[in-house]
Amino acid sequence: MLSRLRYLASDVRHWLSQRRGRGLALLAGVLALGGAGVAGYLLADDDGAEGESGGGTEVVVGDVSGPEPPAELGFPAVATANTTRVPGADPIADAAGVALAVFPSAGGVPGPKAVTLVDTADWAAGIAAAALMGDPIRAPVLLTDSGEMPDVTAEALDALAPAGSPETDDRQAFRIGDAAEPDGLSTLDVEGAGAAEIGVELARLRARLTGGKPQHLLLVSSDEPAFAMPAAAWAARSGDPVLFVDRNAVPDATLDLLKAYEGVPVYVLGPEAAVSAEALKQVREVAPDAQRVGAEDAVANAIAFARYADGTFGWNINDPGHGLVFANADRPLDAAAAAPLSASGAWGPLLITDDPGTIPEQLGGYLLDLKPGFEDDPTRAVYNHAWLVGDTSALDVSFQARIDELIALAPIRSGSGADELAPQPGATEPEGGAGSGGGQEARDR
């Protein structure tokens, strides 16, 4: 284990030496490797001097009690064959990690044009701010804490080095509500009294920066964050503004914007428990064709949104070969932190769980619907990939292992009737053949 860590330290030291600005000491805090003898590791500058770069990196290993027997070796918590984790202990660290993953800004690669700063006290602002990640602005969300700038956010800002551009009105940062103000950056403030006003102001800002009305408007609950979380991923992917309604009423600010954008298609995310029939009725008085998308619990609601399609609106993820992002329903700001992953790489929807250790039944069923297969040549197949956002307290390694299994490519065996997913090469086939014991049929693609 120690030799593995030394090798990793060397690799990370080389990576840090190429970064602009300060060496990043943030690398997601302590990574839980699951080994019995190693509590974890973290990265820090050798001398700890602020403002210096190019120094060595020390790997600090805690509670090493000796070599572990093979049975005690932990399942990889950072990456598996089909998953990658951003292992932040909180959404602040997750936002920094995601921003740096999407904008590596090393080796001469430019960083983002701008960043958006949101305070942890305002989950709704974080979800609405995800729309600024959409083209052409592409500003990832970073988080401040009670009006203060956390070290991990400050270090991420240094590494990202947003330069501004005409698409951002030459601003390097957008500061939302009570977020801390960054030092040395040209900043535009977005203010409002409550979620509805912040959502409206962000919609107006994006319209001004892009020079036109949005393609769609997405309304979510200001009272039920778990039902609103999936909106952040879509906002980042599409640039569609996220607006807020109360359970039983629509704030005047939201209604006024709906009137101003007459003719723009409107969608309401969530069941009646989140946005009541009365609230939807008020929406339809100014947007008669508004459509509701969603399901009765938060897990199923995210799945319904991932499946949904209406013209150019909606993910329409109903077949294999996609990116997916997973977060815990109890950490709504992880939706804002993760949003750039839905607008880059293997762009994909946000799915959530209400249990960090197990896969909810409806989520497992949905992932089986997306499971890719191959008959002859796996290199010509399509693949799924999942990002997990949060440390193992948010999404356990057992959850990650099961996700990896559910989305993995599988061989398909033809037989009488429908094709079936065969056991992986070298696997023992259960008694009764591949179709027994819970085997899954491969759907016609």
Image (cartoon, rainbow, N blue to C red):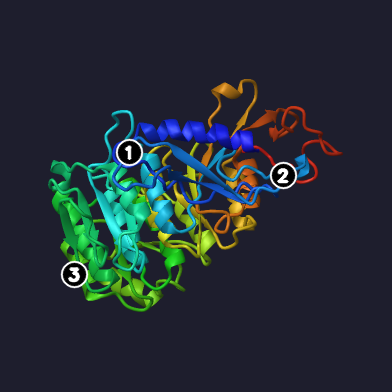
Q: Is any part of residue 264 visible from this angle?
A: yes
CA distance separating discs 3 and 1? 50 Å
Amino acid at the residue labelled 3: Asp
- Residue highlighted by disc 3: 256
Q: Earlier in the sequence, mark 3 or mark 1?
A: 1
Q: Quadrant of the N terminus?
A: top right
Near mark 3 (Cα within 10 A), the count class, few <14, some 14-19 or many ≥20, is few
Q: Earlier in the sequence, mark 2 or mark 1?
A: 1
Indicate the secondary structure of the residue bearing disc 1.
loop
Q: Position of residue 399 (x, y in %)?
A: 62, 51
199 or 160, nearer to the observer:
160
Q: Is any part of residue 290 visible from this angle?
A: no
Is residue 443 positioned above or below 353 on the image? above
Q: Tag on residue 53? A: 1
Which residue is rendered at x = 40% and y = 57% of the image? 92
Near mark 1 (Cα within 10 A), the count class, few <14, some 14-19 or many ≥20, is some
Residue 344: quadrant of the picture: top left
Q: Tag on residue 230? A: none
Near mark 2 (Cα within 10 A), the count class, few <14, some 14-19 or many ≥20, is few
Q: Position of residue 213 (x, y in %)?
A: 18, 52
CA distance separating discs 2 and 1? 34 Å
